[in-house]
Image (tube, rainbow, N blue to C red):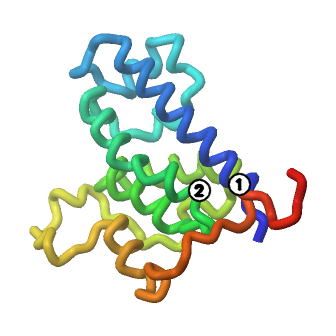
Amino acid sequence: MDDRFDRRELLLHLGDMLEALNCLARTGRPDGLVGQLATQQESLQDFEFLRALAPKVTVAEFSARVASAFFLWPKELLETELNRNALASTVQHDLFDGDPDGWNAYVAHVQKKVRWFGTGLPEMKKDALAGPAHDAAEEASPVEASVEAAPPAEWDAPDEKKGWPWPQPGSTS
């Protein structure tokens, strides 16, 4: 499957996330509400995905959530085999936990460029914090689940890179 254009779009989206984060940090208002700032600050007007966030998310909370949700993306986007679930589930879990409406709006935004993004993930429950308590040690994070899913033989395989962004053997590009 040739997914280089999807990888490019996701990389551009990651850049937009970092740019939005930078613009929010420059407001000097860590306790400011992201949704409110997104409507007031001209530098944030183009970041449609900010409107998908829960209304009570502050700049400081958004910063922490973005770092957690997207830290894996550069590595995942460079892997030979694209782990679509890992890319989407970390964002769902870390940026939109307990906010299914926000997640659905965000997925709709990203799917304008990457049609498969967010498909195949379990349905989210509204306000996960209000639900029954769960043992975090028993629940694997999306990152841990993607690491555990790799068969042991894959860990010992040589790091052979084929295809995008690595040229095919014998190609001149």
Q: Is 44 on the left or on the right of 96, as rendered? A: right
Q: Is 153 on the left or on the right of 77, as rendered? A: left
Determine the residue positioned at 39% across, 39% down: 53
Q: Decide which of 137, 123 is in the foreground and name it.
A: 137
Q: Decide which of 40, 18 is in the foreground and name it.
A: 18
Query: Which label number is shown at residue 22?
Result: none
Q: Decide which of 1, 94 is in the foreground and name it.
A: 1
Amino acid at pointer 1 = Pro
Determine the residue positioned at 52% across, 14% down: 43
Q: CA distance from mark 2 to mark 1?
A: 7 Å
Query: Which label number is shown at residue 165?
Result: 1
Q: Is residue 58 above or below residue 10?
A: above
Could you say which quadrant of the image residue 142 lies in? bottom left
Could you say which quadrant of the image residue 59 lies in? top left
Residue 98 image offset from top left, x and y in percent: 29, 55
Residue 60 image offset from top left, x and y in percent: 25, 29
- For marks 2 and 1, the one nearer the N-term is 2
Determine the residue positioned at 33% across, 47% down: 68
Q: What is the crowding at mark 2: few (fewer than 14 residues within 10 Å), some, or many (at least 20)?
A: some
Q: Are marks 2 and 1 in contact (CB under 8 Å)?
A: yes
**Residue corresponding to mark 2:** 78
Q: Is residue 106 above or below residue 48?
A: below
**Quadrant of the drawing holding the N terminus:** bottom right
Determine the residue positioned at 17% across, 57% down: 129
Q: What is the crowding at mark 1: few (fewer than 14 residues within 10 Å), some, or many (at least 20)?
A: few
